[in-house]
Image: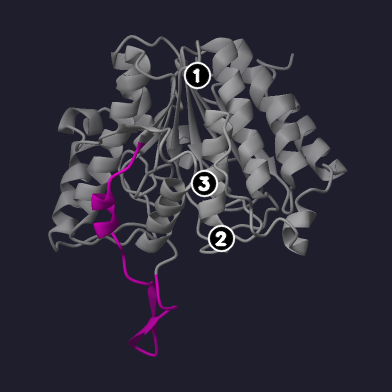
Amino acid sequence: MLGYSYSARVLAHDPPPPAVRIAGRSFTLGSANVAQAVLTAQAHDLVERSALGSLLAHIEPVPAPEEALLAVHTAAYLDRLRAACAGGPWDGDHAPVTPATWDAARLTVGGVLAAVDAVLDGGIRRALVHARPAGHHAEPDRAIASTYLNNLACGAEHARARGVERVAIIDWDVHVGNGAERIFWDRADVLAISLHQRDWYPAHAGALSATGGSGAEGCTVNVPLPPATTDAGYLLAFDEIVAPIVRRFRPGLIMAAAGQDASVFDPTGRMLVSAGGFRMLAERVAQLAEDLTGGRLVVSTEGGYSPIYNPFCLLAVLEGLAGESGGIPDPWHDDATVMAARAPADERVRAAAAAVRRAQPRWFP
């Protein structure tokens, strides 16, 4: 049975659209924030309507305790975030806050902790946390790009505290998983792999040459992929880079940051992944967990901003994890853009994989 953690309370976190200063006045960009709450609500509604809705084991999230947050974030940062949500000054990088942000972020981390507990206790083998807000950009002392607390990093630390010797984090969001890169830079007990669009966001992380600090060489793995990488390109990167590294690392728990913003319709990326592609990625990570961890796998959603496609991509991830069909076909399967996602992996992707192998001598001697 597949666990599923979600609470409608997180929808209260709904930041306004961004604004810039032009000619001394505020100029609002668009009518909604790219991470608007309706996207999360729509995706959950589709899950509930699907054949999977009645098969999921619901995991009730509770707000994460302070000590779980302090395992990843500095006390000064948490105080600053709390105060900002209460109306104080704020310095987040493209991460606006509302009065509901602190509570929603704590609840989402709590959902990840509860999912980790459920998996480690053996009640279920796999779980997905429908997260809001996302977390993979959040660093110990700052919020970045609509992420405030690093959900999976807190979950990994919780698993370690419960006795899991090694945790692997696989991040396929279109943007760099900079949070895990920084948080676990010097750690040999957490493997942080990020598949992301090359030369994308944020620019301060995600380089091929970033492979981990002293004593943790190879525990940071960046897989920059070229724009317009298709389903087959992502699967090639998973099969030839991700899976071999994770197998050699031999984790006791696998966690996945399942962003859907590499989709063909997403406004924040330039990739060509279809709902079917996300299903196959989820199937592969589930199989990897079966082979290595006795099936123990915790997945948390990250980005995904297409109103017309994100719900179907999330459902596809759940289908891949559950090994069951949701009974709702991709309504865009014959659209020309989605059909382009079925193109084979090209030489640019093969060259990208070869570059990762050269940058990671620990795993590819």
Q: Is residue 31 left or right of residue 161?
A: right
The answer to the question of whether label 3 and label 2 lie on touching residues, with beta carbons closer than 8 A, is: no
Image quarter for residue 224? top right
Element type at mark 2: loop
Q: Is residue 39 left or right of residue 361?
A: left
Q: Nearer the viewer, mark 3 or mark 2?
A: 3
> Where is residue 300 drawn, in percent x and y?
43, 37
Residue 268, label in figure: 2
Marks 1/2: CA–CA distance: 34 Å
Q: Residue at x 50, y 10 (%)?
A: 294
Amino acid on which disc 3 is placed: Leu
Q: Tell me the kind of residue under disc 2.
A: Thr
Q: Which residue is label 3 attached to?
A: 314
Locate residue 339, reporting x and y percent: 78, 55
Question: What x and y, as percent, mark residue 188?
Answer: 47, 16
Q: Is residue 127 magenta?
A: no
Say if residue 66 shows up in the picture: yes
Mark nearer the N terminus (1 vs 3): 1
Residues at circles 1 and 3 in contact by the CB criterion of under 8 Å: no
Disc on the earlier residue, 3 or 2 = 2
Image: magenta residue range: 5-32
Q: Classify the position of the N terminus by image quarter.
A: top left
Classify residue 245 by image quadrant.
top right
> Where residue 214 is drawn, which disc sits there?
1
Q: Residue at x 82, y 42 (%)?
A: 345
